[in-house]
Amino acid sequence: MRILIVEDDPSLASGLARILEAEGYAVDVTSRGEQAVEAARQERFDLVILDIGLPGIDGFEVLRRLRGAEYRMPVLVLTARDTVGDRVHGLDLGADDYMAKPFAMPELAARVRALIRRSQAQTGPRITHGPLTLDTVARRAYLIGEPLDLAAREWAVLEVLLGKVEKIVSKEAIIQAVAGWDEELSPNAIEVYISRLRAKLERAGVKIRTVRGFGYMLEEFKQS
Ligand code: CA
């Protein structure tokens, strides 16, 4: 799950990033609307948090361009001015939710979860692989019916592999899917997450194969 934050107040942006990363999302931050539109062209985001008052093109214009280009990810708009006119304008342009500053971080986190839940409801929130189930909405994992404890990064790596069963996924692709732009995540770190996942999953017959020089592959589950 990848979230783009478009906010030119650096302390607010980093506070938002921190709270969302702690919930297990990969988070990218930009302070410029033009960059946000470009980023959406290059990468897939599950949600955008969009400030209205930005240098350069404003949040309304960003929203207009995103929806004009048929990007349908949920967009949560932030604004300093809580006026009915602004709210209506944002919703008319295709915003999914709206928060006026200042707001409480826990409320924002709850709105983010709700928006992602709503958009996931269309694609189906559960991923199953043999004895392993990931409920991507409740963010809970189960192995042979028992709750399985996964750290945020382990969850993210596993989600990537589950999307490509029996296909080789490069370490680079995993880093790309799991880390934000400003994070240095080394291939060695990915090895660590993989070995932790193996320790948790192999007893149930869920196998992650190393493809030397390329990356990893989640093997098709076979009942033994
Ligand atoms: Ca601003």
Image: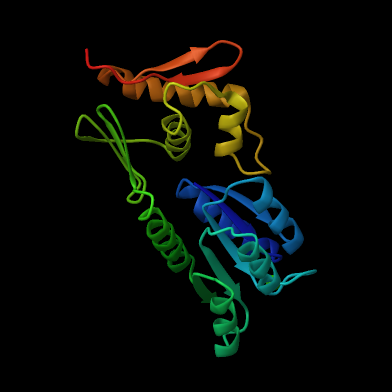
Percent from the top left, x then y, of residue 204?
26, 20
| Residue with the most extreme left position | 145
In percent of the image, x 32 and y 23: which residue is there?
Answer: 201
Relative side of 144 to 108, left or right: left
Question: Is residue 170 among the parts visible in the rendering?
Answer: yes
* Ligand 1 falls in quadrant: bottom right
* Residue 223, quarter of picture: top left
Taking depth in this image into account, of 102 and 209 the one nearest to the observer is 209
What x and y, as percent, mark residue 45?
56, 51
Q: Count the labels in the image.
A: 0
> Is residue 121 placed above or below 95 in the rendered structure?
above
- Judge from the rendering whether residue 98 lies leftward or rightward of residue 224; answer left or right: right
Where residue 206 appears, x then y in whole percent?
32, 21
Residue drawn at point x = 54 percent, y = 71 percent: 95
Side of 108 relative to 173 (left or right): left
Taking the image as drawn, is residue 32 in sight?
no
* Quadrant into which the C terminus falls: top left
Query: Along the horizontal axis of the image, is 71 left or right of 23?
Result: right
Q: Who is closer to the viewer here, 56 or 38?
A: 38
Residue 131 vs 178, above or below: the answer is above
| Residue farthest right in this picture | 56
Question: Height in image: 79 above or below 112?
Answer: below
Q: Foreground: 10 or 115?
A: 115
Measured from the top left, where is residue 79 in percent x and y? 61, 76
Q: What's the colour scheme?
A: rainbow
Query: Toward which corner of the image does residue 109 lie, by quadrant?
Result: bottom left
In the depicted structure, whether residue 143 falls above or below residue 23: above
Which residue corresponds to the image point at 68% horizontal and 43% vertical from the top-left?
182
